[in-house]
Image: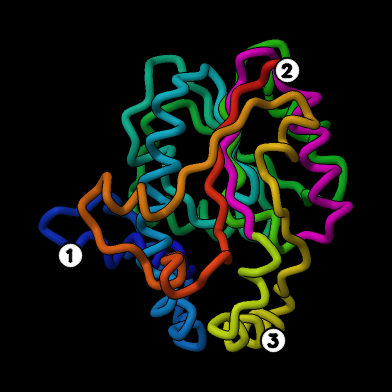
Amino acid sequence: MLIAAARANEQSRLRRLFNDPLAAGLVEAAGSASDLNGVKNLAGDHFVLRTRYFDDQLLESAQPQVVIMAAGLDTRAFRLQWPPGTTLFELDLPELIEFKEDALHDLRAEPACDRVTVPCDLREDWPTALIRAGFDPKRPTAWLLEGLFMFLPPDAGERILYWVSALSAKGSTLALEHVNRAFRDLPQMKAVHRRFDRLDARWQSDVEDPVGWLAGYGWQAEVTHQVDLAARHDRAVPAITDPLKVGDARIWLAAAVRTG
């Protein structure tokens, strides 16, 4: 809901970084997220830049298969201009997918690619569910893991990255977000953590060297700093990612290519 609300707010800008005509309708269907307004005010600009970053990474990779892990209220299957023949898989919990399908039906949304929903729990045997849904591990894939890893215990995150790597043909791409420990420990984040704790969504992991971490699984990665991302799109650097305000704290935005 937080990310969809940030996407909806972006639509009021004259020079918006992306178009998302479905975001507002999904937020309305989901109900109020007022108890998370503090999080939105702190990180909303980051969510917008992050959305554009991952949009660009997925389209530039131009893979025949796209997998969005923990898709939530993601609308990329509907709002991006996918190459002909693209199949996009959305993985998330069954009850969330059921809600989203009902909301999209009410909004008369039509996907711009072959969209396949995969109801599953990422703590369980999601690879089997994905393959049964039509995923082919022999074909190159573009993976997106946005806003996921920090919410997982370290062993669960490693297990997901292991299986993503095992299912990826050479030349596949991966885009992800993670944070370092300094970011988790920021004073500005204390109120955020309290709110997430009340939702049973506490942050549980971090990584200090995302490039080295991904290399260990056969990926060649590059990190883009939000300062550079903001400059690229002529936007102010979000305060929560500005080194002048947060020092060594980092939200990592990384893109990688499968080399092994």
In the image, is residue 63 above or below residue 45?
A: above
N-term mark: 2 or 3: 2
Report the residue at 61% width, 69% height from top: 183
Label 2 secondary element: loop
Estimate how packed mark 2 is, as few (under 14), some (14 to 19) or many (20 or more) residues with alpha carbons within 10 Å.
some
Does the magenta portion include 164?
yes
Query: Foreground residue, 130 or 98?
Result: 130
N-term mark: 3 or 1: 1
Label 3 secondary element: helix
Question: Label 2 vs label 3: CA separation?
Answer: 38 Å
Residue 198, label in figure: 3
Report the residue at 83% width, 35% height from top: 162
Q: Is residue 116 visible?
A: no
Mark 2 and mark 1 residues within 8 Å of each other at the beta carbon: no
Query: Foreground residue, 221 or 109?
Result: 221
Q: Residue 112, percent across and down?
A: 36, 31
The magenta region covers: 152-179
Residue type, label 1: Ser
Residue 12, label in figure: 1
Mark 2 and mark 3 residues within 8 Å of each other at the beta carbon: no
The C terminus sits in image quarter: top right
The residue to which callout 2 is attached is 137
Query: Foreground residue, 134 or 224?
Result: 224
Residue type, label 3: Arg
